[in-house]
Amino acid sequence: MNLQLITNAEVVHKQVYYGHPRPGNGEESVEISYPTTEVVGHGSFGVVFTTTIKETGEPVAIKKVLQDRRFKNRELEIMKLLKHPNVIDLKYYFYEKDPHGEVYLNLILDYMPQSLYQRLRHFVHIPSAMPRLEIKCYMYQLFKSLNYLHNFACVCHRDIKPQNLLVDPVSWSLRLCDFGSAKQLKPSEPNVSYICSRYYRAPELIFGATHYSNQIDVWSSGCVMAELLLGQPMFPGESGIDQLVEIIKILGTPSRQEICAMNPNYMEHKFPQIKPIPLSRVFKKEDDPTVQFLANTLKYDPMERFNALQCLCSSYFDELRHAEGHLQDVVSSLKLLEFDYDTELAHLTPDQLEAVKLRLKPISVR
Ligand SMILES: Nc1ncnc2c1ncn2[C@@H]1O[C@H](COP(=O)(O)OP(=O)(O)O)[C@@H](O)[C@H]1O
Ligand SMILES: [Mg+2]
C-alpha cells in the first residue's frame, strides 16, 4: 500500500442532506469530510468513486450525476423511499457546481466490494463454475429485494443485470443498485419500452409494449441466473431484434396467446415456427428444481411468469430452508429467512399470508 498516496489525498468537507428523514431530530443536513480517491466505475450517466467518511468511519461509494435543473432527479426521489437489507442505501446526498456552472448531484451510498459481473468474471477466468450455493444465495437476495421493491415501494427497477447487483464474495451478501432507470409504474400510464440492457430485456419490451409490469424485472433476473450457471449470457442478442431471435432459438416461437399477452398489436405478425429446446438440455448439469425455476422465470406471458414472492417460495430455494452446518450459518448471518411483515408481506390476504409464512420458514421450525 502506498502510504504517500493516502496521506496526500485531499480531504474535502461537504454539507450534505440525509438520505432518509431522521427520526425525532429535525436536522436535515450535516457536515462530513472524506479523502478524495480513485474512480471505480464509469457508468452511462456519471462516475462512481469510493472513500470513507472521516466522522463515522463508514466506507461509501459516491455516484456523481449531471443534474438537469428543469426536472426532479427520479433516481434520488426513488432512493429516498427505499430501505431494505438487499437494496443499496442512500446515506447522504449533496449538489455541487463545476466551474462551467453545471450542477451535479452526488449520491453517497453504502459500499459493496464488487459487482456480480466482476464476481462471475473471476470464475470464468480461473476457469471454474460459480458454486451453485453461492448462486442460490445471490438469487434469493435478488428476489427478496424485488419483492420489497415491487410490492412495498411499487417501483420497477427496469435495469436488472450483473453490473447492477453488488456483492460481497466473502459473506455472499447481495444488494441491488443503480436506480437510474427505475420508475413507479401506474397501470393507466404508458411507459417507454426502450429501457433495460439488451441481453436482459423481457420479450414484451422487445415487442414494444408500453403497458408492461414489474414482471420485466423477473425476466431479467432469470437471465442473470442463467448467466451465472452458464458462465455466459443466455440470450446474447446483437441488436434489438436479434435479441428476440436468441430467445426464440431456445424457448421456441411464442403462441398466439403469448404474443397477445406481450403486445396485442403483433397478433397478425407471422413468425417462423421454431420448436423449443427443453431447458433440461440447455442446463444439463442442473437438478430439476433449478431447471423448473428457470422455466418459471423465463415465461413469455408476464402473468404466467412467477412474481418475486412466488420465486422466493419455489422449491429451488428449499435447500436454504433445510440448511445445516456452514450453510445454516450463512443463511442466518444474511438473515435470509427473516421477513419484515410491513415491508415484505403486507400486500397479502390473511390466507395467503399464512401459507407464505409457512413456506418461507426454516424446515426445522415448521
Ligand atoms: N455502492 C457501491 N459500492 C461499490 N461500487 C459501486 C456502488 N455503486 C456503484 N458502484 C460501481 O459503479 C458502477 C456504476 O454504478 P451505477 O449505479 O450502476 O451507475 P450507472 O447508472 O452509470 O450504470 C457499478 O456497476 C459498480 O461497479
Ligand atoms: Mg449501472
Image (cartoon, rainbow, N blue to C red):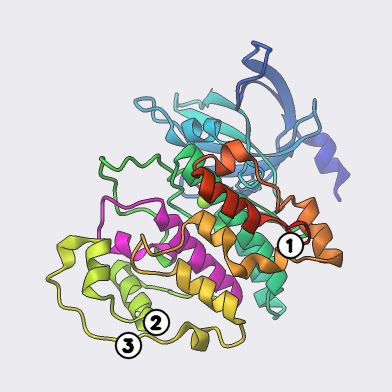
Membership of 218 in magenta stretch: yes
Residue that carries the numbered disc 1 in the rendered image: 363
Instruction: Give the overall secondary structure of the magenta segment.
Output: helix
Residue reaching furthest to the front: 351
Residue that carries the numbered disc 2 in the rendered image: 250
The mark closer to the camera, 3 or 2, is: 3
Q: Residue at x 42, y 51 (%)?
A: 158
Q: Which residues are magenta?
A: 200-229
Quadrant of the rendered image containing residue 53: top right
Q: Residues within 10 Å of mark 3 (few under 14, many from 20)?
A: few
Between the residue at mark 1 and the residue at mark 2, the CA separation in whole angstroms equals 35 Å
Q: Residues within 10 Å of mark 1 (few under 14, many from 20)?
A: some
User: Is the C-beta separation of discs 3 and 2 under 8 Å?
Assistant: no
Residue that carries the numbered disc 3 in the rendered image: 275
Quadrant of the rendered image containing residue 258: bottom left
The yes-or-no answer for disc 2 within 8 Å of ligand 2 is no
The location of residue 202, given as percent across then percent down, is 37, 63
The location of residue 91, given as percent across then percent down, is 65, 31
Residue reaching furthest to the left: 268
The mark closer to the camera, 3 or 1, is: 1
